[in-house]
Amino acid sequence: MRLAELSERSGVPIPTIKYYLRERLLPPGRRINARQSEYDEGHLRRLRLVRALIQVGRMPVATAREVLAAVADGDLGPHSRLGAAVWAIPDGPESGEDDPAAETARRAADDLLEQLGWTFGREAGARSPAYRMMVSGIATMVRLGYPCDVGQLLPYGRSAAELAVTDLDLVERYEPGEGQVEAAVALTVLYEPVLLGLRRLAQAEESNRRFG
Amino acid sequence: MRLAELSERSGVPIPTIKYYLRERLLPPGRRINARQSEYDEGHLRRLRLVRALIQVGRMPVATAREVLAAVADGDLGPHSRLGAAVWAIPDGPESGEDDPAAETARRAADDLLEQLGWTFGREAGARSPAYRMMVSGIATMVRLGYPCDVGQLLPYGRSAAELAVTDLDLVERYEPGEGQVEAAVALTVLYEPVLLGLRRLAQAEESNRRFG
DNA sequence: ATGATTGGATACTAGGACTATCCAAGAAGG
DNA sequence: CCTTCTTGGATAGTCCTAGTATCCAATCAT
């Protein structure tokens, strides 16, 4: 199919698709001749994923590029690809800070991983974006004067573990390969608004139950 | 204290504080005379909360203004204030779409709330930002061709319910009043990166356990 | 043949979050 | 009291990101 049809079927305006091609979020089409290219269902699928990551996952274009590169990287085994893709996902505002709050936060986070027994997280992922995102959140709480120790964090860790089991169960429904990696990325990123929305609704519900 | 000291103690540059004052994210200081104002610890605290919402919670300035207005609104009782504050929080890109995917998503979401027995969510919150955020995530999954029915969503709902219980337990440690509302907002927003980070680390851990 | 369409290059725009400059009215030091 | 510095408010400018618009020569459809 041509650019026009790709645009038609995805609902994304042509200039935007051109922009994504420029930014290498979308691989170039198969060249028909010096002046025209052909796109396939894979491009359409990829384009929808790009839009999802950027608009629903609120991911910056540069981050989306890295994630998608990891999804497509054939050199990695299924598990590393899954890991690599999720690995690259977020980037909070590079905390960088080395104030006492950050130090406290880092210690709390490490204690938490220790108590949860997440060894993989400590070896390979201790400085992953996910870890840094978490620490930056904790540090901010500490700076605001809210206590934020392991005791408080532990229940969240346990819930996260449950969520991950659910996530992986869903991922395992897809046969290994690029499709599975893409499913994992979609599931990780697109279930975030779902999960956060559910949490807020649940808070309203629980708040109503207690004080209403 | 004067602007300069407020800036010093918060680490926020003076022009940025002026900007927040203009945007009414920070209440004006107590006027000393026609040309000068005095700020107190409350301003410092509020300023830190603003920064947290904007930088860690990635919240647009306009949204932060609404949330903070709800926190400060003395006309509301403690519970409504808590609700109002959390209510105003997010705003995904106004799905607005009325394609079949959105319809499917809405039905799945309503089924889910039904099965979870969240009556409050349906009465008052069915069209809340949280609800819309959730539906938009589900709709995107559907558009990408991933099945997304109640069966899949239910475990997430249950986890969310657990999270909310943990959240409310923490909120109840603070005595009712503005402080409690602020705590609720901080907890809701600032634990989001913590929670999402934990989920990703847990996924890595679980993935390693299954395939590693 | 001829007018529309294609894909690439380049330049432009809109919105958000700051940031810099200017200004007149205090405050501070001698 | 007079000069110099500092303060808070108003205005305008900057930077970045994500997306649009315009041009162009080469094709395609009729």
Image: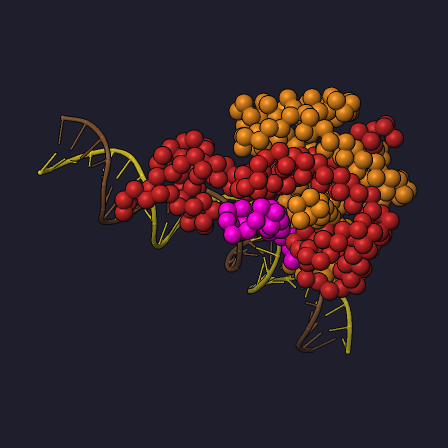
Chain colours: A orange, B red, C brown, D yellow
Instruction: Please tell me whether residue B73 belongs to the stretch shown in magenta.
Output: yes
Classify residue A38 by image quadrant: bottom right
Instruction: Please tell me whether residue A195 belongs to the stretch shown in magenta.
Output: no
* In the image: residue B38, left or right of residue B67: left
Residue, x 45% and y 49% (percent of image)?
B24
How far across and down, in percent of the image, does residue D7 sit? 31, 39
Classify residue A181 by image quadrant: top right
* In the image: residue C20, left or right of residue B207: left
Q: Farthest residue toward the front?
A: A211
Who is closer to the viewer here, B57 or D30?
Answer: B57
In the image, residue A113 sits, relative to residue B94, either above or below, namely above
Query: Where, quadrant-wise, is the C terminus of chain B in this rendering?
Result: top right
Residue A79 visible from this viewpoint: yes
Residue, x 80% and y 29% (percent of image)?
B205
Q: How many badges with numbers are in the image? A: 0
Query: Where, quadrant-wise, is the N terminus of chain B in this rendering?
Result: top left
Who is closer to the viewer here, B178 or D6?
Answer: B178
Residue A25 visible from this viewpoint: no
Give the residues drawn in magenta, as a range. Answer: B70-95
* In the image: residue B1, left or right of residue B50: left
